Image (tube, rainbow, N blue to C red):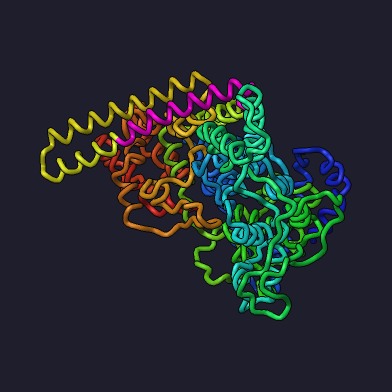
Amino acid sequence: MIVHYLRPFIGVFALISTVANAELSLEVVKNTARGIDERIQVNNAKQGIKPNPIVDDSTFVRRAYLNIIGRIPTYQETQEFIADSTPDKRHKLVDKLVYSPGFNSKMFNFYANMLRLQTNQGQFGLGWHVWLREQVNQNTPYDEIVYTMLASSGHASDNPAVGYYLRDTNMLLDNISNTAQVFLGTQIGCAQCHDHPFEDWTQKQYYQLAAFGATLEYNRSELAQKKVREVIEFKRGTAEPVARNDRKKRRNNMRQEAQGLRNVFRDFRRNEVNYISTKQLQLPHDYPYNDGKPGDVVSPAVLFGSMPKLDASSSGTEQLAAWVTSKDNPMFSKVIANRLWAHAIGYGLVEPQDNWTERSDISHPEVLDSLVKIMHLTDFDTRETLRIIYHTALFQRETCAFELEGGAAHDFRGPLLRRMSAEEIHDSLLTLEMGNIDDKENKALNYKWTAYTKGIHHLMEMSPKEVIELGESANEVEKKTRKLRTQITELRTKEAEFKAAGETEKSAKVRRDIAKLALQARQIRMDASSDKMVSMTMTRNLRTRARTPLRASEMPAPYNPGSFLRDFGASDREITNSQHTLSSIPQALSLLNGKESAMITDKRGKLADLLNKASKAEERLDILFLSIYSTLPNEKEKEQFLSLLDDPRDTRALAKAMLTSKRFIFVQ
């Protein structure tokens, strides 16, 4: 039993849980993993289900790299593992990968898809992206990440976790619904408009939960207002006095003075969340039930369990954060434990993962209880929890090649066969082209966010006189660029007319003129940036995409429609975990003819370089199989393919055929 294996180490866990980011001993991990395997096997034996056989080294190394760090191993990494003859090499590989930068890359995708993070939604989206990536890299405990987001307030430049609320600006009810779904696995969205038709949730309960966020205010910036008031007071002291009883003139003066600073502070309210203690949530005007009347003020109340004892000054969202992330909240721990299990094994102990009900079928309740205990003993350390799962014998077993539908339970005689995610395919092709680039970061993201935050902080430190001068400069920049934008719009209309008439030379000339005007506008903004304008105008135009290829986690998301990643099912980040692995014709065409696969076999790619250096056909075939499939070719494959390896064109054709095969696309 898992309890049997955990009992000797509870003291160790308790000690470790007091130290941030502590690494469990391998012996503790292996014994705990063994207990999980035992519970699965005992449960399955009662139903006459036998575990699948353990996979060979080639299958394991490929699976380990894809499941743990989100890409296939390089040619050299595969060679090293297969050549290693030590008996515990699989355990050593798991630990090596769990503590590698690649693990952080895949975990960031896990969080970002779950939270619907959109990098370019605004400055706050960029800040949320950079902040979340830092939390993953630091292995911040899961409950701490969630609490920080749910309790957040202020301007994004000071607290980028407010991106969680700004993601759904002015949509409090939708945000609360998403919070319950993502962190508690509870779908209450139907109760926003009426009592839930299939569950016990009422519309009143929905509004009571949403009432924790009733005081949230999206439409103003206290940070900007404070500075504007400072400037207005300064201008009053230098302007001609206005009669005390001439209120209308005083208001007009204040409005004009504030308007002059509009271009300096115009983005502030879009990037800030504050609280107004007097705000309240009321039942809708058409509320039909007898437990309340339309327009009644709603008091906050939790869906289940009890509210932790907090200081009386705690805000509503701080109360919500404390309740959601409490160890006494049973759903919080169960939902993340189940998500991590599915992340590692390919299918949840409960499916669907974000719609738990009284009818939910838990395939192995004892295993779920054990994972919850592990989460609590490690203080919600997702890295160490996943590490234990990756050390199970289950993770080493042959996959089950059948499809489960409708939330059916999986017996876990082995992991579920699955297709690579869009990010895994992208990152694996990149590995074939460039090798291991797991530690390469998109510095453009950091640069843009740092420039923005520095600009905001500098603005807050400016004297009123400097702010006034900055406002005048910003207004001038806006005037000039608006004029250029108008000219560009007119020229684009002309370009379209010339194209429609088939006048290609005139169309090309207009296109050149447009490029010149765009360059002028950019230069105006660049000149303004040297005048301390970077925080207000320039950061909208700074690049967030790196100039060199990077892993998917380092790219702003959601990825553009029609891009390689979206074609292969990457999330549009509109709803939680909307990524998919459905096949399509554009996917096949991308692998056959797209630039991603073409770069792998051209003269610059790592794989092409290895093939060019090989002197024999047998060596080239080994390179192809080890690089793409992480295994050596068998005798039949040698007989079938060796004759193709003498001609470079045939070699490239074989490589492309291998990349389009199910053997490459699926994680066995």
Picture quadrant of residue 439: top right
Q: Main secondary structure of the magenta part?
A: helix
Going 43% across and 26% down the picture, which residue do you hit? 476
Q: Does the segment drawn in magenta span residue 376? A: no
* Place of residue 34 in the rendered image (x, y in percent of width and height, measured from the top left): 73, 54
* Place of residue 598 in the rendered image (x, y in percent of width and height, measured from the top left): 32, 38
* Place of residue 320 in the rendered image (x, y in percent of width and height, measured from the top left): 74, 55
Going 43% across and 22% down the picture, which residue do you hit? 526
Going 52% across and 46% down the picture, which residue do you hit? 118
Above or below 78: residue 146:
below
- Tell me where the magenta segment starts and ends, as one range: 458-486
Above or below 518: residue 289:
below
Going 47% across and 43% down the picture, which residue do you hit? 630
Residue in the foreground of this view, choosing between 262 and 430: 262
Would you say residue 90 is visible in this rendering?
A: no
Which corner quadrant holds the N terminus? bottom right
Residue in the foreground of this view, choosing between 547 and 337: 547
Q: Does the segment drawn in magenta span residue 480? A: yes
Would you say residue 405 is visible in this rendering?
A: yes
Residue in the foreground of this view, choosing between 188 and 209: 209
* Place of residue 436 in the rendered image (x, y in percent of width and height, measured from the top left): 50, 33
Picture quadrant of residue 130: top right
Picture quadrant of residue 36: bottom right
Q: Spot the residue most to the left.
A: 502
Residue in the foreground of this view, choosing between 46 and 207: 207
| Tally of marks | 0
Q: Spot the residue most to the bottom.
A: 290
